[in-house]
Image (cartoon, rainbow, N blue to C red):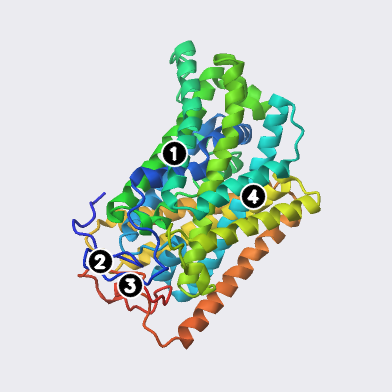
């Protein structure tokens, strides 16, 4: 993979190119220089909720696809590493809190950017709101089992809203520190389990069968890949925080590669540990039993003791809380970016005078989640089967569609002028990533029941809002472009040697913000 040019291009939307860069318009700039590589890394990994993925989803992956689950997680990580190659190169030329919107708008034009903006906003908002149902469900179950507390799930969901809302309103680095602690704890319990298995079983059960192509890619693996690819949702979050990053030309690529690489290896290894603990025949038999969902709790209790199973239950709750914080921040920043660029009311694009956070956008994100929780309670809906699965099923599909379009936008942006990047990084890798994402999207659409818990017309009805908001975004962006006499936004800045397709005044820029 060829290295990026040594000198970074002039900065993007709201990001000064150097000390002499013009100041941003008061009240519209996010706090700069607050986040380092590992701050952003924690946001992305926390959004993936590794403990919830392993303890909650991996057992189902084994049940659906057999012993190839570790290989499926590793292969999915390779797909996203390929995507990250072009994504991080493009991030040098587009720095905007509405990452998908800005990327797709820059590469494919205003209308595509407008459609992407609304799909991204709705997808992230749905995922964020759904996680409150996830939090409420697991917290109610865990605390009832441990302490005999018979408290309605909505109480825990509302407590989560208060915590997440407060952190989202305040400065971003506070949330990053809390996420770091929560993520380390959830990873640590799984690492301790892996060490215990190794100490007890040695390496004799670490067979290569889980990575054999015949076990990873088979007629039953479709549902398994839905879960494996979905476990990486949120990797693009690194670019969302580019405006708030220290030295974003280095911080964003590092955080992206670290996050995707870590998740791929961690998921694959922890799933492999389960095979090593039980053996190929044992894991196959257990995954087909009624107790399959408790796989990692059973392993924790068997190898570490009852305390470990208890701790794992508590840490799943904090894992979900961490993921909710991450998705809340991402949703708020999309609202902020769209308000700043005129696709939504301008007040959403203002920052808090003290915290430099997208405070109003954060409040709106909180209110939307609160409304969905209240509706679920009033209609006596299930926090897991409805509030989580329905919202996240739609949201995950929306994000994967945007990831695929982003790969197309990257190739189109670099195809005429690679701006010093190697052909593999900005052309070949994004195209290979696009193939992987397209296959994943087909698998998701043909296995909608796994994402929504439904097998009827509801599956397709749930996708209608994505189509409607995409159409609205495209039409609205087109009308704004036609009626505006202003030059296009400097949201995208190209290198000094760039040719006209990358010019800051290109009509394909996604916005007409006054920032530069």
- Horizontal side, residue 228 vs residue 306: left or right: left
Q: Secondary structure at mark 3?
A: loop
Per the image, the residue denoted by label 3 is 516
Please report whichever mark, 3 or 1, sits nearer to the chain's N-terminal start. 1
Give x and y (percent) for residue 58: 57, 34
Tag shown at residue 180:
1
Please report whichever mark, 3 or 4, sits nearer to the chain's N-terminal start. 4
Residue shown at the point (59%, 62%) measured from the top left: 364
Residue shown at the point (25%, 74%) measured from the top left: 499
For the residue carrying disc 4, how many other residues have a C-alpha within 10 Å: few (<14), some (14-19), or many (20+)? many
Kindly indicate whether the residue at mark 3 contacts the one at mark 2 (C-beta within 8 angstroms). Answer: no
Give x and y (percent) for residue 407: 42, 59
Question: For the residues carrying marks 1 and 4, which lies nearer the camera in this image?
Answer: 1
Q: Quadrant of the C terminus?
A: bottom left
Tag shown at residue 10:
2
The Cα–Cα distance between marks 1 and 4, rounded to whole angstroms, is 22 Å
Please report whichever mark, 2 or 3, sits nearer to the chain's N-terminal start. 2
Residue shown at the point (59%, 52%) measured from the top left: 127
Per the image, the residue denoted by label 4 is 130
Question: For the residues carrying marks 1 and 2, which lies nearer the camera in this image?
Answer: 1
């Amino acid at each position: 993979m060829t290295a990026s040019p040594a000198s970074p291009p002039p900065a993007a939307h709201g990001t000064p190119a150097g000390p002499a860069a013009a100041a941003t318009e008061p009240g519209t700039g996010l706090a700069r220089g607050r986040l380092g590589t590992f701050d952003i890394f924690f946001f992305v990994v926390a959004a993936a909720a590794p403990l919830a993925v392993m303890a909650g989803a991996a057992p189902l992956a084994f049940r659906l696809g057999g012993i190839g689950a570790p290989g499926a997680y590793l292969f999915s990580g390779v797909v996203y590493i390929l995507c990250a190659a072009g994504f991080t190169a493009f991030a040098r030329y587009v720095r905007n809190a509405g990452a998908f919107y800005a990327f797709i708008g820059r590469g494919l034009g205003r209308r595509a950017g407008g459609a992407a903006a609304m799909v991204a906003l709705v997808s992230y908002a749905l995922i964020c709101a759904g996680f409150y149902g996830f939090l409420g469900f697991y917290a109610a179950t865990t605390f009832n089992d441990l302490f005999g507390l018979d408290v309605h799930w909505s109480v825990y969901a509302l407590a989560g809203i208060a915590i997440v809302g407060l952190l989202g309103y305040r400065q971003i680095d506070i949330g990053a520190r809390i996420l770091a602690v929560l993520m380390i704890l959830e990873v640590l319990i799984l690492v301790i389990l892996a060490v215990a298995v190794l100490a007890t079983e040695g390496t004799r059960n670490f067979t290569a069968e889980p990575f054999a192509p015949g076990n990873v890619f088979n007629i039953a693996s479709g549902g398994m890949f839905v879960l494996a690819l979905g476990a990486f949702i949120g990797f693009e979050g690194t670019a969302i925080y580019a405006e708030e990053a220290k030295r974003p030309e280095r911080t964003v690529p590092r955080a992206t590669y670290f996050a995707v690489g870590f998740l791929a290896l961690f998921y694959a290894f922890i799933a492999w540990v389960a095979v090593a603990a039980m053996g190929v025949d044992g894991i196959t038999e257990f995954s087909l039993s009624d107790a399959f969902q408790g796989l990692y709790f059973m392993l924790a209790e068997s190898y570490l003791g009852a305390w470990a199973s208890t701790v794992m239950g508590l840490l799943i709750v904090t894992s979900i809380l961490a993921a909710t914080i991450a998705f809340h921040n991402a949703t708020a920043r999309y609202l902020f970016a769209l308000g700043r660029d005129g696709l939504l009311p301008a007040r959403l694009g203002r920052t808090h005078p003290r915290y430099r956070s997208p405070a109003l956008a954060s409040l709106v994100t909180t209110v939307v989640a609160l409304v969905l929780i209240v509706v679920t309670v009033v209609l006596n809906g299930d926090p897991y089967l409805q509030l989580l699965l329905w919202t996240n099923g739609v949201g995950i599909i929306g994000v994967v569609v945007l990831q695929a379009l982003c790969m197309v936008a990257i190739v189109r942006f670099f195809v005429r002028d690679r701006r010093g990047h190697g052909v593999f990084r900005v052309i070949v890798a994004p195209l290979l990533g696009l193939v992987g994402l397209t296959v994943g999207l087909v698998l998701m659409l043909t296995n909608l029941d796994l994402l929504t818990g439904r097998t009827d017309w509801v599956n397709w009805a749930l996708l209608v809002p994505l189509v409607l908001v995409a159409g609205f975004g495209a039409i609205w962006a087109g009308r704004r472009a036609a009626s505006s006499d202003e030059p296009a936004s400097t949201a995208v800045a190209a290198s000094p040697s760039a040719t006209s397709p990358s010019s800051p005044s290109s009509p394909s820029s996604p916005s007409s913000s006054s920032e530069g």
